[in-house]
Amino acid sequence: MTATDSIGEHLRGARERLGLGVIQVAERLHVDVAVIEALENDQFAQIGPPVFVRGHLRHYAQLLGESVEALQDRYAGLQESLDTPDLSMAPRQVAQPPGEALLRWPLVLGAGAAVLALLLWLGFAAEAIS
């Protein structure tokens, strides 16, 4: 397996070197032709979850006399690159304990009432002076 070959290209090349057709391989592996075509076209999502893809890759590699480990390692590398991104560098918002948000409301209401009382007092004081 060369570094530039995809998994599908490698499988197709090995199959062709053995003189096998897609239908012959599908019959020997007891799978649909669509599974073989998906493997050879690197369309692994069409096959299903990774556990199914690994199983099909293993059986196909064994049939072709290819290294199962090399194909499995290449597929594992693809899966790692498709996994969720590393969010460890993303900024985090610290979650507040639920009680802390509830304690803030009385303070906000009390401050609002104090400002309103001050404005009313200033309004009455200005009226009394004039």
Image (cartoon, rainbow, N blue to C red):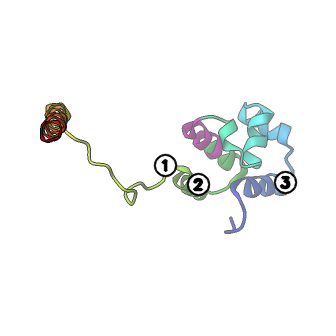
- The C terminus: image quadrant: top left
Give the side of residue 26 with respect to residue 99, left or right: right
Is the stretch drawn in magenta largely helix, strand or loop?
helix
User: For the residues marked 3 and 2, what is the alpha-carbon distance in whole angstroms?
Assistant: 24 Å
Instruction: Mark 1 vs mark 3: give the one in front.
Output: 1
Coordinates of residue 36 in the picture (x, y in percent): 76, 41
Give the side of residue 20 with respect to residue 90, left or right: right
Q: Quadrant of residue 51?
A: top right
Identified by mark 2, the residue type is Leu
Identified by mark 3, the residue type is Glu
| Residue under the image location 59 percent in, 40 percent down | 55
| Residue under the image location 20 percent in, 35 percent down | 101
Residue 59, compared with residue 9, is above or below; it is above
Closer to the chain start, of discs 2 and 1, is 2
Identified by mark 1, the residue type is Thr
Residue 100, compared with residue 73, is above or below; it is above
Highlighted magenta segment, given as a residue range: 49-57
Residue 57, compared with residue 29, is above or below; it is below
| Residue under the image location 62 percent in, 55 percent down | 71
Q: Quadrant of residue 105?
A: top left
**Foreground residue among 65 and 11:** 11
Closer to the chain start, of discs 3 and 2, is 3
For mark 3, give the secondary structure.
helix
Binning the other alpha carbons within 10 Å of mark 3 as few (below 14), some (14 to 19) or many (20 upward) gives: few
Closer to the chain start, of discs 1 and 3, is 3
Q: Which residue is mark 3?
A: 16
Q: Which residue is mark 2?
A: 78
